[in-house]
Structure formats: structure tokens, C-alpha cells
């Protein structure tokens, strides 16, 4: 096997099954985006100071959801982002430790783990530097068997990544600090690379298969991660 083949190999996972599961994930993401018209924050009383119902804008093929994050403030947005990174970082760390991957697949999962943990450290330092409280780590929970089955693990990874991407893309324009905005966009770009990396492991062709990365409204992100123990409050 040459280098290119090793990078695009589905690592022993049935390609057709992975493709079907990917399409299910894509359908979920589309459904989440369609929820962009949800009114109000509905996540915690301290988020209830928005002065109007969020009305996402549409620009070309994109739905712009930053309006649903207005009123939270930079610290609250970064705190929620930190919890999302903890969710993903812990997930990938458990995947590395589970021993269900080897070779190029293990190297890819390890690289994503390291990046997510670096994001955790970066956001923690950012909150501390701004004098904002760092939220305690959430009590995370994952579906039974996800760390025993490579296909199940990758399917969940293919769900987590669009949520993180959509959250950063949705919230970025609501950030007041230009420094925080630049940091959020940088992390967003890294998360997009992770999505492509998971696509490669699932045998999705082409792995970079989106013209535009969808953004997600706040409530769609909250609903997506709540079953895993993550809340924005």
C-alpha cells in the first residue's frame, strides 16, 4: 500500500456502511440548520437578556446564525466553547486509549485528540486572562459500546465535528473582542480539518465534500450536546 492509499483507506470499516452513516449525519446537520428560526435562548436565565427574537439572516447558500448568540457576551460564548472542546477532547482521548485503532487511523485520532486538548488549554487560558470564571468540567457521558466498535466511534465523531464547526461559525460574529474572534476562527478552521480527517477514515469521497461549512444556531448546539452532559450554563 502506498502513502496515498494509507491516508484514504477506510481502515477495515465497510465503505458503503460508512457512507450511509455519513449521509445520516449530513441529514441531521441539515435538520439542525432548519431549526435556525427557533426563538429565544431558553438555556439559562443569564442568557435571557437579548432584546429581540433571533432572526437568522440568509446570505447566498449560507444561513447566518450569529443573532442567536447575541446577548451572551464573550465570556459565556468562550465558556460554552470550552465545554464543547472538553466533550471532544475526552472523546478522542478515550478512543486512543481504547485500543480499537492502529496504524494511520490511530495516528489521525491521536492528532485530533491533541488538537482538542490544546483548544481546551487555550480557551481556559483565554478565560483566565480575561478575568472570567472557568466552568468546571462537565460530567460527560457517551453511548454504550462506542469505544469498543471503530465504526460506532467514527460515526459519533462525524456527528461531533459538524456541531463544533457549526457552533464556532454561528457564534464568531457575536464576539465583541477581535482577539477572541480571531481565535475562534482559527479553532473553527482546525475543526474543519478534523471533519475531513474523520471523512477520510470513513472512506467518504471526496473527503472535503462541502462548499460551505454550515453554521448552527445556539439552541441547535445546546440540544445536540445535552445528551452527553454538556450545558452552556
Image (cartoon, rainbow, N blue to C red):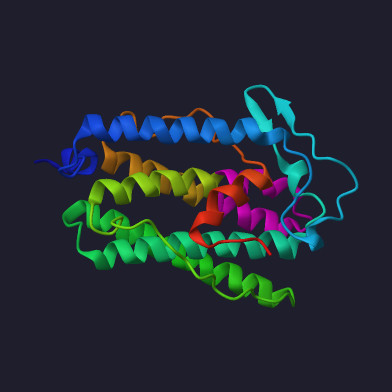
Give the quadrant of the C terminus: bottom right
65 shown above or below 91: above
Can residue 36 be found in the magenta stretch? no
Give the quadrant of the N terminus: top left
| 162 lies left or right of 14 | right
Q: Nearer the viewer, residue 215 or 126?
A: 215
The residue lying at 40 percent from left, 32 percent from top is 24
Q: Position of residue 216 (x, y in %)?
A: 62, 41
Can residue 180 be found in the magenta stretch? yes
* Residue that lies at the very extreme toward the right in this rendered image: 51
The residue lying at 29 percent from left, 54 percent from top is 108
Q: Position of residue 8 (x, y in %)?
A: 23, 38
Q: Nearer the viewer, residue 56 or 200?
A: 56
| 73 lies left or right of 195 | right
Based on the displayed image, in which of its 4 quarters is residue 122 positioned? bottom right
Q: Which residues are magenta?
A: 166-188
Q: Position of residue 196 (x, y in %)?
A: 38, 41
Q: Main secondary structure of the magenta part?
A: helix
The residue lying at 88 percent from left, 42 percent from top is 52
Amino acid at each position: 500500500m502506498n502513502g496515498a492509499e494509507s491516508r484514504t483507506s477506510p481502515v477495515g470499516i465497510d465503505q458503503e456502511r460508512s457512507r450511509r452513516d455519513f449521509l445520516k449525519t449530513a441529514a441531521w446537520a441539515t435538520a439542525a440548520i432548519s431549526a435556525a428560526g427557533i426563538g429565544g435562548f431558553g438555556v439559562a436565565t443569564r442568557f435571557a437578556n437579548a432584546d429581540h427574537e433571533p432572526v437568522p439572516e440568509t446570505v447566498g447558500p449560507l444561513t447566518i446564525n450569529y443573532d442567536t448568540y447575541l446577548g451572551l457576551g464573550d465570556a459565556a460564548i468562550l465558556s460554552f466553547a470550552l465545554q464543547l472542546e472538553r466533550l471532544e477532547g475526552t472523546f478522542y482521548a478515550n478512543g486512543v486509549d481504547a485500543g480499537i485503532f492502529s496504524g494511520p487511523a490511530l495516528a489521525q485520532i491521536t492528532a485530533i485528540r491533541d488538537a482538542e486538548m490544546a483548544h481546551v488549554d487555550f480557551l481556559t487560558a483565554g478565560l483566565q486572562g480575561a478575568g472570567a470564571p472557568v466552568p468546571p468540567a462537565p460530567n460527560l457521558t457517551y453511548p454504550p459500546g462506542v469505544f469498543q466498535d471503530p465504526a460506532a466511534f467514527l460515526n459519533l465523531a462525524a456527528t461531533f465535528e459538524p456541531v463544533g464547526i457549526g457552533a464556532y461559525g454561528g457564534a464568531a460574529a457575536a464576539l465583541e473582542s477581535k482577539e477572541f474572534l480571531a481565535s475562534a476562527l482559527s479553532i473553527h478552521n482546525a475543526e474543519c480539518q478534523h471533519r475531513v480527517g474523520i471523512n477520510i477514515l470513513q472512506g467518504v469521497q471526496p473527503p472535503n465534500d462541502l462548499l460551505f461549512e454550515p453554521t448552527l444556531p445556539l439552541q441547535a448546539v445546546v440540544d445536540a450536546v445535552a445528551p452527553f452532559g454538556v450545558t452552556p450554563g
